[in-house]
Image (spheres, rainbow, N blue to C red):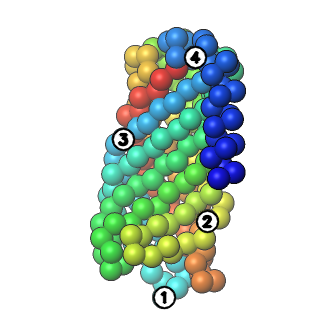
Amino acid sequence: MKTRTAVLILLIMSLSLSASAFDGKRKGFVIGGGIGGSPVTRWSTDYLDMEETAAALGFSGFLGYSWDNSNMIVLDRSFASYSSDEFTSSRTMPNLHSIRWYHYFGKEGSTVFTCLGVGRMHLFNNDLDIGDPKLGYVLGGGYEPVRHVQLGAYFIGGRSHSDGHKFNHAILQFLVTVTAY
């Protein structure tokens, strides 16, 4: 109940701030999502020396704010989804909940960008919650060929723990992202 109330208050407060949002200029509130591929999705653990590397579908969703045409900060959730050979459930999803900083080197619609972020890494399986979140990070970059569309490459890494065992994660993602600003 408290969370819903806080979200509602923030939403009402943001209405007055967002009068100039979504005007096609990369300043103000931003929201976006991406889909693509993760040709390398890898995790390993010290438990029985288990490890797995697979190709996966990559996804990302974010919400944030751009204080000028060049800098944007967002809350992002990125994950890769694939069928695991190591777990009884078919769906396994390593994911990163992060705060990311995007820096654009030009105007909207024809610019390169970089991305840096830090957050909490987690490994999820349909049957098991197999990792307590620990530190994760993302490094990336790409190109915005037209307004609102980004082509990006990202490396996501980090750790999670489960029952005293360490899990290491590495994901390479290529995403096409649509951003409303």
Q: Which mark is residue 133?
A: 2
Kindly state the secondary structure of the residue where label 3 is placed.
Answer: strand
Mark 2 or mark 4: whose residue is earlier in sequence? 4
Q: Is residue 113 left or right of residue 60?
A: right
Q: Is residue 169 above or below residue 6?
A: below
* Residue on which the image places disc 1: 48
**Residue 122: percent from left, percent from top:** 55, 63
Q: Is residue 91 left or right of residue 16?
A: left
Tell me the amino acid under the disc marked 4.
Ala
Mark 3 or mark 4: whose residue is earlier in sequence? 4
Q: Which mark is residue 90?
A: none
Tell me the amino acid under the disc marked 2.
Pro
Which numbered disc, 2 or 4, marks the residue closer to the eye?
A: 4
Q: Alpha-carbon distance for marks 4 and 1?
A: 51 Å
Kindly state the secondary structure of the residue where label 4 is placed.
Answer: loop
Residue 34 appears in view: yes
Which numbered disc, 3 or 4, marks the residue closer to the eye?
A: 4
> Foreground: 106 or 180?
180
* Residue on which the image places disc 3: 35
